[in-house]
Image (spheres, rainbow, N blue to C red):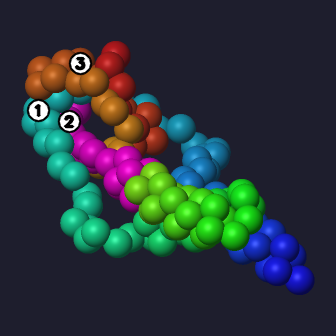
Amino acid sequence: MARLFRLALLILATTLFAACAEYPVANTVTRVEYGYVETLEVYRESDNLPVNVGTVLGGIAGGVIGHQIGSGRGNTAATVGGAIGGTLLGHEIEEKVAGSHYRVTVRLDSGATLLIEDNRDVDLRVGDRVRVENNRVRRA
């Protein structure tokens, strides 16, 4: 019964991690425009809390995995060690997922200004010629 509970808990943790991932949605209409980068801002969208979803799920998963090792006091030590390691790893993963965000202002060839927010590494500089396709910016 306990083994079944641990397996269910591990499956739940894995499912929650997978649910947090972002999946691209296919658009049927492609909008392409060209222009120049006018401003580029980098900011971190972090909650600055020591405990976040990744921390909790990592601790649970690490504890469950650690509990599978050894018996007696060794089992207890492995459970605690796994929980601590999972907590640290889960926190780091959550911080990377939150990561850096970019706010790019593009002066389009038409004269209009377009503000685009992106969480991918954009590798752009002010003055670069860019192609904007479905609100994604890349060097032209």
Residue at image coords 58%, 47%: 24
Q: Is residue 47 visible?
A: yes
Around disc 3, counting alpha carbons within 10 Å, would you say few (fewer than 14), some (14 to 19), or many (20 or more)?
some
The magenta stretch spans which residues? 90-112
User: For the view shown, which residue lies furthest in the front direction?
Assistant: 73
What residue is disc 1 on? 38
Name the N-terminal-most of marks 3 and 1: 1
Q: Please, what is the three-letter code of the amino acid marked with disc 2?
A: Val
Task: Indicate whether residue 98 is drawn in magenta.
Answer: yes
Q: Are marks 2 and 3 in contact (CB under 8 Å)?
A: no
Q: Is residue 112 visible?
A: no
Q: Is residue 22 left or right of residue 98?
A: right
Residue at image coords 60%, 51%: 23
Taking depth in this image into account, of 132 and 11 the one nearest to the observer is 11
Using the image, determine if residue 29 lies above or below residue 33.
Answer: below
Question: Where is residue 115 shown, x and y percent of the image?
Answer: 22, 47
Question: Where is residue 110 shown, x and y percent of the image?
Answer: 22, 33
What residue is disc 3 on? 129
Task: State which quadrant residue 63 falls in.
Answer: bottom right
Numbered badge on residue 106:
2
Question: Where is residue 15 shown, x and y percent of the image?
Answer: 69, 65
Numbered badge on residue 93:
none
Task: State which quadrant residue 16 falls in.
Answer: bottom right
Q: Please, what is the three-letter code of the amino acid marked with disc 3?
A: Arg
